[in-house]
Amino acid sequence: MSPRSINLSTESPASVPSVSLPPSPAGASISDATPLSPRSVLAALDAHPDVSPQQLRQLVHSLALTIQTRASQHASQVAGLKNVIADLEENLGQVAERWDSPPEGYVRNNDLVPDFNIQQDSNRVRAKFVRLHAGDPTCVHSLTGNEKPGEGPYSKPVYATPVRGVTAAR
């Protein structure tokens, strides 16, 4: 901050009557303006009713610089957030594709194993994906698709349902 700038952004107008505006040095230009918050400008104007035109121009240019800087920062933040949103939406599509797909070696249950319900977080959840147990043909493994790390697969014994009217071949 330059020695003649005022930083009153944390001060209320009532607490600044002892602050005086420094005189503009000879040869000072508007390009020497440093950003000032709107509160600082208002506090300086309230505290010093006899502001010279040069000092007033300096305050106005400082305030305009602050507004331009904040608008530029805001535009950069909005552009950055739009990029983040686009990336997240792209990732969401990939995650949604994978979430609904059966894991390797599994198929959708689609009533292949009816009434295969799993107790999960005090709820009974239907098995979404199933596969035949590799070592025991009388069991199937299943997943709900919502397992937490370390959970599943779940096993259930399966039996052939008898069909009436069919006799065994001899």
Image: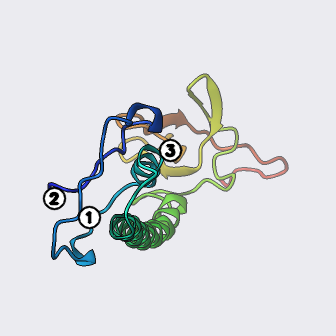
Direction from residue 65 to residue 12 in the image, left or right: right
Q: Residues within 10 Å of mark 2 (few under 14, many from 20)?
A: few
Looking at the rendered structure, the kind of residue marked 3 is Leu
Q: Nearer the viewer, residue 165 or 145?
A: 145
Residue 96 position in % (x across, y down): 52, 63
- The reply to whether dot 2 and dot 3 touch (C-beta < 8 Å) is no
**Callout 1 secondary element:** loop
Residue 115 position in % (x across, y down): 69, 38
Name the residue that disc number 2 marks. Answer: 2
- The reply to whether dot 1 and dot 3 touch (C-beta < 8 Å) is no
- Which mark is drawn over residue 105? none
Residue 17 position in % (x across, y down): 38, 36
- The reply to whether dot 2 and dot 1 touch (C-beta < 8 Å) is yes
Q: Residues within 10 Å of mark 1 (few under 14, many from 20)?
A: many
Q: Residues within 10 Å of mark 3 (few under 14, many from 20)?
A: many
Residue, far right = 165
Q: Nearer the viewer, residue 147 or 19?
A: 19
Residue 132 position in % (x across, y down): 47, 50
Task: Mark 2 or mark 3: name the one nearer the start of the chain.
Answer: 2
Name the residue that disc number 3 marks. Answer: 143
Instruction: Write down the quadrant of residue 15 in the picture.
Output: top left
Distance from the alpha carbon under mark 2 to that under mark 3: 67 Å
**Callout 3 secondary element:** strand
- Which mark is drawn over residue 34? 1
Give the residue at x 48% y 35%. 155
**Callout 2 secondary element:** loop
Looking at the rendered structure, the kind of residue marked 2 is Ser
Give the residue at x 37% y 36%. 16
